[in-house]
Amino acid sequence: MNENMENYKQFETIRHGEKHGEELSEVGIEQSKIKAQELLEEIKAAPDGSVFYAMSSNVGRAIETRDVIESELITLAENEQGIEFISVQDVEKIKQAKGDKTKKYVITGLQPSTALGFNERTPSLSAFLKFKKAYKNNEDLIGQTWAAKSGELEKLKEKIRQEIPDLDVSGINPKEFDETPEEAALKYIRLMKRMAEITEKYFPDHPWKGLQIGHNLSADFAALAMLDKNISVESIEELGGKFRQFLESAHFELKDGKIVAKYRDQEVEQEKDLDGIIQDLEKASEERKKEWGAVS
């Protein structure tokens, strides 16, 4: 967190807890409880007036992760006099908190967002499910296929051939995803911008942190953009070649018109704000669409 904690404005993006089928497993529930313990220590160390909230994707396992974190936080903080939990629907309490910096506030019950998740109308879902079956549930290969630039595709096909020898890789084509990985990242980052605006509106001059609970591929595409990297196989390999594990975090701080991004062993300070990152992603997405259009 920012050394100047009085003014911090931060997002943390995490993947949901471990799943069993489409729901949280027992391990996932325990992981979420441990995350709540970590958050409580962070809240206790934060300056008075700080505001915290968690928003999940619309997908069940992410909602469950958020619910476990919130309920565990409430239990753990039962005897903490300086922490107040306020439902997002409690307009009067939110108004009171706006002008009161004597406590730390946790806003609960935020509506889940499809921007952090997916549904049957998500353009990339069909290709994701197709490759999930073809790649025997290897989501790292799915993400790399989606992110692959034209110059990276043949090398990636060889890697896939080595890992799945019985698979015909000749027809693998990233454009099957229909939406670019930049478009997937944009959903995350546009939501960050919107939530920052809402938080500043209701809690002006308060330090704050928003926790986004989503999924591995889109969250990591967004993290690459926040780290000032192109979305590509090469960039994924620079992060270790694997997409984020359950509950793994990336941290983004909004600081004087700049972004400080931290993920794994990478830390970057960008001389641009969220609008600048959004503009860069929009441009990169259009370039990829042209590239996809040139690929048969």
Image (tube, rainbow, N blue to C red):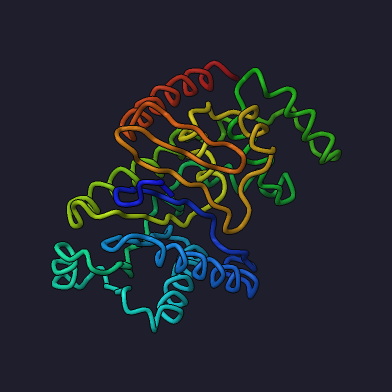
Q: Position of residue 65 (x, y in %)?
A: 50, 67
Which is more toward the observer, 255 or 239?
255
* Quarter occupied by the C terminus: top right
Give me the residue at 38% from left, 26% from top. 271
Can residue 180 be seen by looking at this rendering? no
Q: Position of residue 74 (x, y in %)?
A: 40, 78
Can residue 141 be seen by looking at this rendering? yes
Give me the residue at 49% from left, 69% from top. 36
Give me the residue at 54% from left, 68% from top. 32
- Number of callouts: 0
Q: Is residue 142 above or below residue 15?
A: above
Which is more toward the observer, 256 or 181?
256
On screen, residue 177 versus residue 287, left or right, reads right
Displayed quadrant of residue 164: top right
Farthest residue toward the front?
3
On screen, residue 203 versus residue 265, left or right, reads left
Q: Position of residue 125 (x, y in %)?
A: 52, 47
Give me the residue at 19% from left, 67% from top. 97
Q: Is residue 13 above or below residue 69?
A: above
Which is more toward the observer, 134 or 203?
203
Q: Position of residue 107 (x, y in %)?
A: 30, 67
Which is more toward the observer, 102 or 138?
102
Displayed quadrant of residue 95: bottom left
